[in-house]
């Protein structure tokens, strides 16, 4: 009689093991994984044995485990879904190094922005792959700026803002289209803003519903101000505060498919310096747009 197969380990535990090993390139022992993840030693051993049999992890001579070559079989599927992987890693790392800031790449979906890649220092913000932000006003401004009039009207109506606020938001969208990117200001000092954003993001699970995320956005608006600086506010050598600079990567339909964000968080940066950041960011997004055969309409 054939021996019944033991049930597969719960998916969440398998994912936790793989993520822990991805953060430890030199490997971890089974006991260390069990301790760090709050698993029993038998559960950790069962998961590792299953992953080792598929090649998703490999056992080293010192009996520790690290990610295995079997995961390479998944890369083709990932590259088809996320065609910017690879070239985006290089571009984002270059931006982060040159401008000394954190950088993220987010995918624009029908109702949210999903972070898929980070570079530089983003740990302070707890900003990692999987985080999502709804395309609400004002967070979706860059993603919405190149939409047609009807779509923009619907988006603005969803904010339930008054006429004056809606008129200002239309001016903001016009400004983003003309400049090619958005610059967000900071109402408080950068260190305080970073700490508050970290706490907010850490309080929302990566698998949280968009409604759960939205419940935090009103608080987040108070941190980053929800305030996109106009072109006339960015001119000259006067210093101002800035949290993010964000530009789109366009698809073949001339609509933003991804957003690249510079996480500057500078209490005092001149308009000239911001223009340099914006120009360097646009150079990056144009490379990425060309890579996916997109239609860049920023000039």
Image (tube, grey):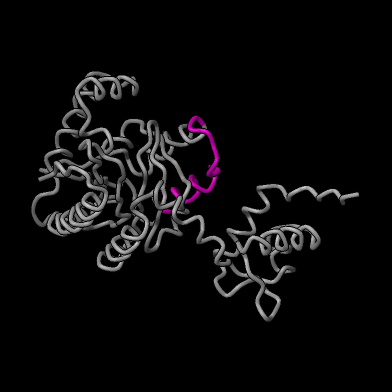
Tell me the magenta residue range. 194-211
Vertical order, 257 against 25 (above or below): above
Q: Which residue lies furthest to the front in this view?
A: 1
Please check the rendered image and state whether residue 207 is part of the magenta-colored stretch, yes or no.
yes
- Residue at image coords 64%, 60%: 54
Front position in the image: 137 or 286: 286
Residue 131: within the magenta? no
Comparing 193 with 101, the one in front is 101
Q: Residue at x 42, y 36 (%)?
A: 217
Picture coordinates of residue 155, whole percent (x, y):
30, 24
Residue 38 in percent (x, y) is at 73, 57
The residue depicted at 26 percent of the width and 39 percent of the height is 256
Q: Horizontal and vertical percent for residue 63?
A: 71, 76
Q: In which quarter of the image is the C terminus?
A: top left
Q: In which quarter of the image is residue 102?
A: bottom left
Residue 111 picture location, percent across and down: 39, 31
Q: Tell me the quarter of the picture where residue 230 sits.
A: top left
Q: Residue furthest bottom?
A: 61
Foreground residue, 182 or 116? Answer: 116
Q: Nearer the viewer, residue 180 or 10?
A: 10
Instruction: State whether the magenta stretch is mostly helix, strand or loop.
Output: helix
Q: Hey, which residue is sitting farthest right in the picture?
A: 1
């Amino acid at each position: 009689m054939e021996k019944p197969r033991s049930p597969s380990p719960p998916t969440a535990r398998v994912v936790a093991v793989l993520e822990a090993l991805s953060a430890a390139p030199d490997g971890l022992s089974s006991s260390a994984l069990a301790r760090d993840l709050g698993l029993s030693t038998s559960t950790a051993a069962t998961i590792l044995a299953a992953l080792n049999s598929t090649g998703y992890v490999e056992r080293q001579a010192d009996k520790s485990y690290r990610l295995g070559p079997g995961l390479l079989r998944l890369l083709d599927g990932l590259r088809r879904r996320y065609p910017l992987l690879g070239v985006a890693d290089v571009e984002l790392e270059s931006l982060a190094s040159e401008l000394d800031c954190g950088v993220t790449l987010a995918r624009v979906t029908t109702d949210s922005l999903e972070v898929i890649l980070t570079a530089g220092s983003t740990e302070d913000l707890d900003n990692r792959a999987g985080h999502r932000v709804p395309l609400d006003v004002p967070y979706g401004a860059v993603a919405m700026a190149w939409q047609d009039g009807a779509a923009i009207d619907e988006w603005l109506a969803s904010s339930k803002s008054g006429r004056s606020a809606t008129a200002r938001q239309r001016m903001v969208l016009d400004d983003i289209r003309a400049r090619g990117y958005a610059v967000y200001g900071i109402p408080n000092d950068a260190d305080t803003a970073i700490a508050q954003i970290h706490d907010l993001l850490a309080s929302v699970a990566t698998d949280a519903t968009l409604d759960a995320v939205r419940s935090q956005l009103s608080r987040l608006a108070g941190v980053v101000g929800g305030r996109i600086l106009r072109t006339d506010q960015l001119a000259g050598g006067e210093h101002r505060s800035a949290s993010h600079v964000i530009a789109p990567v366009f698809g073949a339909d001339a609509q933003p498919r991804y957003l690249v964000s510079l996480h500057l968080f500078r209490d005092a940066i001149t308009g000239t310096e911001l223009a340099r950041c914006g120009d360097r960011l646009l150079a990056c997004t144009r490379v990425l747009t060309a890579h996916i055969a997109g239609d860049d309409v920023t000039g």
